[in-house]
Image (cartoon, helix red, strand yellow):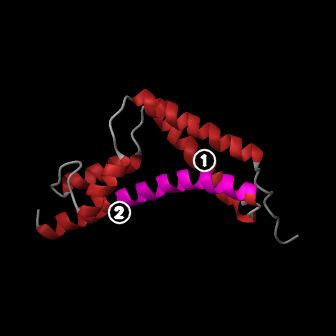
Amino acid sequence: MEDGGRNVYSLLADTALITHFAFVIFIIAGLLLTLLGGVLGWRWVRNPWFRFAHLGGIAVVIAQAWLGIVCPLTTLEMHWRGLAGQSTYDGSFIAHWLHRLLYFEAENWVFAVAYTLFGLCVLAAWLTFPPRNFRRTGR
């Protein structure tokens, strides 16, 4: 394969990794900001779109962990890294450092339990600082 094709796959792999990292930040920061905003009275943390996206996101993570499903973003990234001729965790500067932040070794059950506990915290935040109702428009 020519270098141009490999560069495209490398870029796609880095994009998948950055998207994965952004998702993780959304889940973690979403809970922290919800709790802080709930205490400080920030209205935006009760936005139902934000809260449903956040709850849905952690629900997907928990389901994947308990079912032993590898995150599709990880699968996609690894596929593209392979097509780029890179080893799974070798790659660009961005890939190297984001991998160090995202991936570490542990038994699958450890992640499932950790994600479940985090999800319970999200649920507790939902109950403590519930989202406001969706507003109807046009009526």
Q: Is residue 59 left or right of residue 38?
A: left
Nearer to me, 33 or 2: 33
Q: Position of residue 14 (x, y in %)?
A: 31, 61
**Please, what is the three-letter code of the amino acid marked with disc 1?**
Gly
The correct choice, above or below, for 108 with respect to 30 in the image is: above
Residue at the image point whose x is 33% and y is 46% from the top: 75
Q: Dividing the image into 4 quarters, which one contains the C terminus?
A: bottom right
Per the image, is 124 magenta?
A: no
Contact flag, marks 1 and 2 (Cβ < 8 Å): no
Dot 1 corresponds to which residue?
56
Q: Quadrant of residue 3?
A: bottom left
Dot 2 corresponds to which residue?
15
Q: Earlier in the sequence, mark 1 or mark 2?
A: 2
Residue at the image point whose x is 11% and y is 67% from the top: 2
Q: Is residue 39 left or right of residue 76?
A: right
Query: Going by the picture, which residue comes out furthest to the right?
Result: 139
